[in-house]
Image: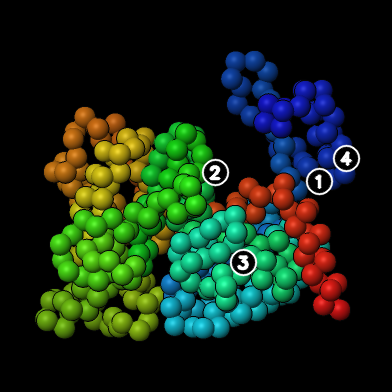
Amino acid sequence: MSIIIEKSFPLTQKLIEELVADNLVTETGYAVSSGGRRPLTYAIQRNVMYMVAVAMDQFVTKIAVIDMQNHLVSSVTRIFLSLTETHSALQVLIDNIAGAIDTSGIPKEKFIGIGIGMPGFIDVKKGINYSFLSLPDNESITKHMAFQLGLPVFIDNDSSLIALAELRFGAAKGARNAMVINIGWGVGLGLILNGALYRGHEGFAGEFSHIPLFLNGKLCWCGKAGCLETETSLLLIKERAIEGINSGRVSRLNTLSLENHETAYQELIKAVQEGDQFTIELFSKAGYNIGKGVAVLIHLLNPQKIILSGRGSAAGKIWEAPIQQALNEHCIRRLFQNTNIEISVLGLEAQLIGAAALVMENYNEISFLKEETTGFELSQL
């Protein structure tokens, strides 16, 4: 701890003792010895501070109140919110976050901030999403939301936050270089380089899904054709499942529709987990194409780990064989033979955990931002 906060050991010990005396920190027992005396460990009390974590994709938004030990305070609120069709999506989001805070029963002053993961091209520093939820004249989403909610707000790309969750609490913990692939309605990528989340010059690093790998003539939502996403996403799997069922393919899938994305996702995951041959074919083909993209990543970055995360990771080990096959065919063996492919253990909650971690990553800014948001509230009276 003294190394992390760059303070002397006696001062660090004194600070911890004061925090324990104020009931802000509690002892959690002894850690495993590394050769000498076993070190005593501490944790922040669960009820000292709380965060609102928000996980958004193109169709569904999840909102949770989380304590300082990453425990859900109440059940997750789910709202069906289409980012591509709803002009009032931002206000709907604000209203639902305010509702989650109110119904939690926790005094507002105990909340330290709101972390939001969302798809799109996001400028983290300015708080702008250039793809969705945009405001006139590229006004900052974070400032707009903080003004209305009276709390600091932080946003980041959904795939970056999933990678942050894996880095702090999941399969990438302790890894120096790892690629976290977010398999969802699109296919995203979070980069962990030299033990830290890498966002690039403007925060747009990791747009894995828009690598032009295919000559299929399919238009991607980004405006280009042949992007990786056009042959790999859960949305593509769902569309091909419906096409196959309509053409007479035998499958336990028989109720999929283009309208209800969440129900379709649950049915697809259930079918692949139960061994439905047609669904396995669809996931395997998508997995192979993801593997072609992974081969590019390995050639460029030589990662220690490739971690499959996001909602699609619920399909489990079905991804591993086709990705490995693609690597065998498209990647130089010497480059990938020591790269491990792993399935996330965080699963569907990875983005929520990452959103909470985003608040803590910005903890040093929170006192200043809280003063600003308090000012906003007073000015409205």
Q: Which one is nearer the viewer's eye here, 51 or 93?
A: 93
Q: Is residue 139 left or right of residue 130?
A: right
> Is label 2 in a helix, a strand or a loop?
helix
The residue lying furthest to the top in this view is 36
Closer mark to the observer between disc 1 and disc 3: 3
> Image height check: is 264 above or below 26?
below
Q: Which residue is mark 3?
A: 140
Q: Residue at x 82, y 23 (%)?
A: 10
Give the image location of residue 361, x and y in percent. 63, 47
Give the image location of residue 32, x and y in percent. 60, 26
Instruction: Give the alpha-carbon distance from disc 1 to disc 4, as whole Å.
Output: 8 Å
Q: Residue at x 12, y 76 (%)?
A: 249
Give the amino acid at mark 3. Ser
Quadrant where the N terminus is found in the figure: top right
Quadrant where the C terminus is found in the figure: bottom right
Instruction: Give the alpha-carbon distance from disc 2 to disc 4, as whole Å.
Output: 28 Å
Q: Residue at x 54, y 79 (%)?
A: 89
Q: Which residue is mark 4?
A: 21
The label number, if any, that marks residue 24 in the structure image: 1
Chain-order first, disc 2 or disc 4:
4
> Is label 1 in a helix, a strand or a loop?
loop
Closer mark to the observer between disc 3 and disc 4: 3
Q: Which residue is mark 2?
A: 168
